[in-house]
């Protein structure tokens, strides 16, 4: 079973913005409300997601007027697969009851998805967004 919910999609969007704004380990924290506004994510939903990411050791928070979130590790070390598995659970590769060989198709699909997500970091997503934004600028 493969399930990637809006939790993972929103988390990747918000973490990409966090990295884009330079909230690297030891850097200046970014307020969660700013991330929610910039990426059009419901604030309460993002607060829940970031609490889970903080408890998992991916983010750290700082309270107060100059508070917000920063990464614990560099975004180049945080894979999309780690985020998806934390928020949506492991991908299951069940043998199933298919006796016609179609199960192999699903097993290969899960393997391919796992490879793409494990090979993609938040830093990669930031770079792809910057590249896409640059490419769009040429066509204005």
Image: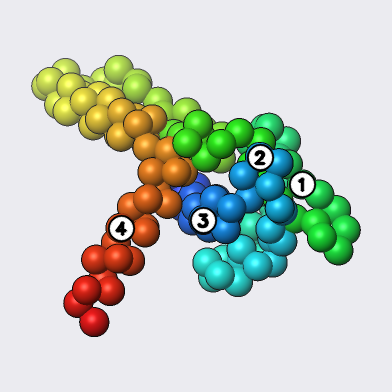
Q: Please, is residue 59 above or below residue 112 in the view?
A: below
Give 119 or 99, whichever is nearer the viewer.
119
- Label 2 vs label 1: CA separation? 11 Å
Residue beneath label 3, please?
20
The picture places residue 88, in percent across and down from the top left corner, at: 51, 39
Residue beneath label 2, please?
25
> Marks 3 and 1: which is nearer the front?
3
Left or right of 115? Residue 78 is right
10 Å crowding of disc 2: few (<14), some (14-19), many (20+): some
The picture places residue 28, in percent across and down from the top left corner, at: 71, 53
- Of callouts 2 and 4, which one flags the residue occurring earlier in the amino acid sequence? 2
| Quadrant for the C terminus in the image | bottom left
* Element assignment for label 3: helix
Give 45 or 126, whichever is nearer the viewer.
126
- Label 3 vs label 4: CA separation? 13 Å
> In the rendered structure, are the residues bearing label 2 and label 3 in contact, judged by CB atoms less than 8 Å apart?
no
Give 13 or 24, whichever is nearer the viewer.
24
- Of callouts 2 and 1, which one flags the residue occurring earlier in the amino acid sequence? 2
Residue beneath label 1, please?
61
> Marks 2 and 1: which is nearer the front?
2
10 Å crowding of disc 4: few (<14), some (14-19), many (20+): few
The picture places residue 110, in percent across and down from the top left corner, at: 29, 30
- Of callouts 1 and 4, which one flags the residue occurring earlier in the amino acid sequence? 1
> In the rendered structure, are the residues bearing label 2 and label 1 in contact, judged by CB atoms less than 8 Å apart?
no
- Identity of the residue drawn at 44% across and 43% down: 123
């Amino acid at each position: 079973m493969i399930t990637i919910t809006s939790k993972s999609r929103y988390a990747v969007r918000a973490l990409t913005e966090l990295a884009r704004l330079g909230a690297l380990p030891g850097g200046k924290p970014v307020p969660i409300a700013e991330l929610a506004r910039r990426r059009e994510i419901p604030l309460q939903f993002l607060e829940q997601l970031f609490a889970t990411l903080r408890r998992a050791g991916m983010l750290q928070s700082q309270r107060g007027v100059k508070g917000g979130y920063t990464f614990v590790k560099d975004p180049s070390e945080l894979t999309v697969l780690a985020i998806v598995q934390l928020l949506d659970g492991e991908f299951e590769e069940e043998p199933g009851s298919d006796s016609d060989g179609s199960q192999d198709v699903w097993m290969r699909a899960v393997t391919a998805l796992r490879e793409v997500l494990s090979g993609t970091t938040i830093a990669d997503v930031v770079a792809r967004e910057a590249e896409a934004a640059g490419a769009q600028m040429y066509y204005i």
